[in-house]
Image (cartoon, rainbow, N blue to C red):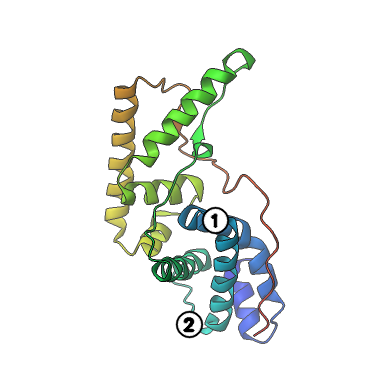
Amino acid sequence: MEDAELIRQVLAGRHEGFSLLVERHQEPLIHFLRRLLRSEDEAFDCAQEAFLAAYRNLWRYSEAYTFRAWLYVIAKNKAMDMLRRQKREMPIAIDESLVDYQAGPEESWLAKEEAEAVANVLNSLPEPYRQALYLRYKQELTYEEIALVLSVPISRVKTYLHRGKEKLRQQMERRGINAKHGKLADSGVSGSTGKAGSLRQPTG
């Protein structure tokens, strides 16, 4: 069942439908917040707050955009509030799992080294490029969803992605990284590498 249909059911009084939305989105959301907050506990708490805020404000949701993007905007704002209270900045780190490499047994060690090198290059990029690359290739958000999350026009999202990949290529060449092993996957990148804990369901 599509998110929009579940939301219509919740708004019609079938509140148990929201638990399905939580199940569907909690793992990638926690992964997203982990990159912002750098703490598993903080990411989990922030995700809980985001789902609760989404539940309480579900009547504000518009099907003009996806629930996922709307939820990520709420979560990002919650994370920013948390960091402001702690007087910290919001960096987005991109780990080596964003890097797509395939190697045989004899090449696995080299591939691992190159993957880590590419991850370091990714983290050296300007923050808007890192954010766009992460949301596109790790979270698999559409251009429209990324634009909503980053609060920028779609044209700027395309610019971030284009320039980010170009800077990545240049840095890789400069550092002598073998592009055959270390490369940014264009598609099919999983949203998370681990199982997130189960969130409590909003009760109203």
State the mark number for residue 60: 2
The quadrant the C terminus occupies is: bottom right
Name the residue type under label 2: Arg
Where does the image place residue 93, in percent across and percent down from the top left?
A: 44, 47
Which residue is at 67% across, 67% downward? 199
Amino acid on which the number 1 mark rests in the picture: Ser
Where is residue 26? Give x, y as percent. Answer: 62, 62
Numbered badge on residue 3:
none
From the viewer's perspective, is residue 119 above or below residue 126? above
Residue visible at 39% across and 61% down in the picture: 88
Lower sequence index among marks 1 and 2: 1
Provide the secondary structure element on which disc 2 rests: helix
Q: CA distance from mark 1 to mark 2?
A: 30 Å
At x 45%, y 44%, the residue is: 94
Q: Nearer the viewer, residue 19 or 32?
A: 32
Q: Position of residue 136 (x, y in %)?
A: 44, 48
Q: Nearer the viewer, residue 130 or 85?
A: 85
In the rendered image, residue 186, in percent from the top left (x then y), is placed at 45, 38
- Is the residue under label 2 in contact with that under label 1 (CB below 8 Å)? no
Image: 65 above or below 27:
below
Assess disc 1: are there few (<14), some (14-19) or many (≥20) residues with their C-alpha within 10 Å of its C-alpha: few
Residue 184's place in the image compared with 192, above or below, is above
For the N terminus, the quadrant is: bottom right
Please name which of the two marks, 1 or 2, marks the residue nearer to the observer. Answer: 1
Q: Secondary structure at mark 1?
A: loop
Residue designated by label 1: 39
Most distant residue in the top direction: 106
- The image quadrant of residue 146 is bottom left
Q: How many marks?
A: 2
Question: Residue at the location (47% across, 36% down)?
Answer: 185
Rendered image quadrant of residue 151? bottom left
Q: Is residue 94 above or below residue 201?
A: above
